[in-house]
Structures are given as structure tokens and as C-alpha cells.
Image (cartoon, helix red, strand yellow):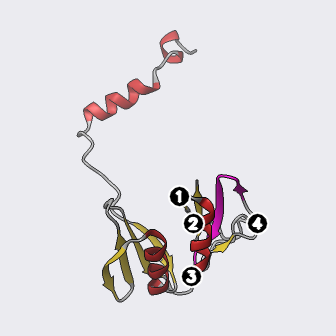
Amino acid sequence: MTSTSDTNVDPGAATSERTSAAQERPRISVDYVVLDTDDPPRLAEFYTALLGWQVEETEDDWITIGGASGTKIAFQLALNHKPPTWPDNAIPQQYHLDLQVDDLDTAVGYAESIGARRAASGDHSPNFIVFLDPSGHPFCLCA
């Protein structure tokens, strides 16, 4: 038999009880977004051109780029990288970037000029267009 107190449980109360019983949440923040690729130099070159960022670190199998905001993207060598087949999920997309732009038409032309390709099928609207980067990762240019 269920008591009245059992059916009126505040889910937030259990969470706050666990939080107060445990340590306070430490500062945790995103350091990098890391993209697997079979060609880190090419992908780093593409994203530095697309975003206007700079290469910050280069190792044998890892390149990091960053911009004024402090955000960083790293490109990690992944031999036998298989790009996602989105929107078909045979190989799921796993992530995508939404990149804000002021002028969608200008940004589209520029992205294509440095190696982006429009996704053959997928979501397109007056406010965004889905592209694939040189390693096949999807990203959106959003107005």
C-alpha cells in the first residue's frame, strides 16, 4: 500500500538532499570540443579559416585552435575515421556544431569556398543550412 507521503514526493527535494550531503559541485567547465578525424591538419585549417581562429597547439596526432572567446576545438587523429551518415543513422552523427552568422548567404559562400559541402539530405530552412566539414562532421550555419 502506498502512503500519501510516498505519492507526493518532491523530486527536487531528493536531489537537494543528495547535494547537501555530498560536497558542493566543483567548478567544471568545457575545455575543448574534440573532433576525431583522419586528417587533423586539414580539419584545423578548415575551422581556422571558417571561424577566424588561430592554431594554439600542434602535436603529432592533435591540433588545438582557439579564438578570442576562450573556446577551443581540438582535432585528434583517428585512423580509419568513418564520417557519420546523417541523417541516416548507420553511423550516427554523435555531435554537431551550430555556428551563428550575421549574413547566411555570405557565410554559405565562404564555407563552401574553403571546403564545406552542403548535406545532401537533411534540414535546411531560411534560418539555417546543414553542411559537412572536410572529415564529414555535420555543422549548421544559423542566421
Which residue lies at the image location 64% right of the left edge and 56% below the top edge? 128
Q: Residues within 10 Å of mark 4 (few under 14, many from 20)?
A: few
Residue behind mark 4? 121
Q: Is residue 3 above or below residue 93?
A: above
Which residue lies at the image location 38% right of the left edge and 31% below the top edge? 15
Q: Which corner quadrant holds the N terminus? A: top right
Question: Which of pointers 3 and 1 lies earlier in the amino acid sequence?
Answer: 3
What is the spatial separation of the Cα atoms under label 2 and label 3, in whole angstroms? 27 Å
Any mark on residue 107, and which?
2
Any mark on residue 81, and which?
3
Magenta-drawn segment: 123-135
Say what amino acid the circle numbered 3 marks: His
Q: Residues within 10 Å of mark 3 (few under 14, many from 20)?
A: few
What is the spatial separation of the Cα atoms under label 3 and label 1, in whole angstroms? 29 Å
Q: Secondary structure at mark 3?
A: loop
> Do the residues under discs 1 and 2 have CB atoms within 8 angstroms?
yes
Question: Which of pointers 2 and 4 lies earlier in the amino acid sequence?
Answer: 2
Residue behind mark 1? 101
